[in-house]
Image: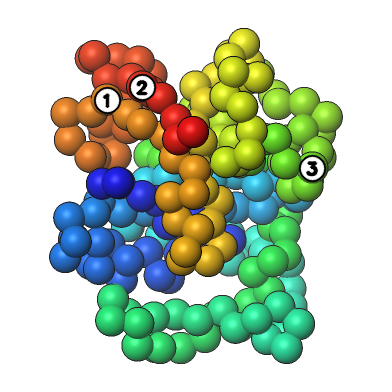
Amino acid sequence: MTLIAVTDHNASENVAATRRAGAKSGITVLAGMEVTTAEEVHVVALFDDLADLGKLQGKVYERLQAGENDPARFGYQVIVDEAENVLGMNRRLLLGATDMDLDTTVAYIREYGGLAVGAHVDRPAFSCTSQLGLVPEGLFDAIEISPFADPADYASCGYPVIRCSDAHQPQDVGRGFTVFELAAPTFAEVRLALRGEGGRRIAGYSS
């Protein structure tokens, strides 16, 4: 595995540290976030530039529902450096939704130069299918399925399909993955692969 993405729920403070840690091991880390829309649909936003991710972060924090995290109920929302030293806590209620609808969320991702991915569309909660009853046509750059779904079931959906681990614990990273044919493990190359351009493509999935 040479490329991963960090997409915490409604937050991005740990992306830069993960990038620095990844660089020491030869792993490219795409900058990202998993945004919860007003419909409670999860959308994965991927970026090359941390500054562009920061623009989306500003919108998310501006429009995230009010409230403070309760660590006793939901766990600690830790901000760390690349050596896993704790720098602080994110006290916002990150499990909440923003007041941005799906179209607005995707529009911001595109405005800031990112890729918008419909998250875990096979899941019975927090997905387009669970919340809307369908995957909207022509909205995303790709859709994501969990490690437990069959990519063949989504072959006619009209979108590139990626499989991801949707890991919430370190040991689950890589539980599900997509094989890309790329010239290099970069954001620009992933964009080309999703579009099937320049000889780049999605070549397969974990089994």
Type of amino acid at the residue the image marks with label 3: Pro
Circle 1: element type: strand
| Structural distance between the alpha carbons of marks 2 and 1 | 6 Å
- The residue beneath circle 1 is 181
The structure residue drawn at horizontal position 41% and vertical position 25%, both measured from the top left corner, is: 204
Q: Where is residue 140 in the image (x, y as percent from the top left)?
A: 55, 28
Q: Distance between the residues labelled 2 and 3?
A: 27 Å
Which circle marks residue 124 in the picture? 3
Q: Residue furthest top?
A: 156
Please report the residue visible at 49 percent of the width from the left and 22 percent of the height from the top.
160
Residue 171 appears at what percent x and percent y?
47, 64
Q: Is mark 2 on a helix, strand or loop?
A: strand
> In the rendered structure, are the residues bearing label 2 and label 3 in contact, judged by CB atoms less than 8 Å apart?
no
Of 179 and 112, the residue lying toward us: 179
Colouring scheme applied when the structure was drawn: rainbow
Instruction: Tell which circle, 1 or 3, labels the residue nearer the N-terminal end.
Output: 3
Pointer 2 and pointer 1: residues touching (CB < 8 Å)? yes
Circle 3 packing at 10 Å, graded few (<14), some (14-19), many (20+), is: few
Is residue 58 something that shows in the picture?
no
Sort mark 2 into few (<14), some (14-19) or many (20+) by Cα contacts within 10 Å.
Answer: few
Q: How far apart are marks 1 and 3 (CA)?
A: 31 Å
Q: Would you name the residue on which mark 2 appears?
A: 203
Q: Which one is earlier in the sequence, the residue at label 2 or at label 3?
A: 3
In the image, residue 80 lies at what x, y percent? 39, 81
Residue at 60% from the left image edge and 52% from the top image edge: 35
Would you place residue 127 above or below residue 33 in this image?
above
- The front one of 6 and 151 is 151
Is 97 rendered above or below residue 186? Answer: below
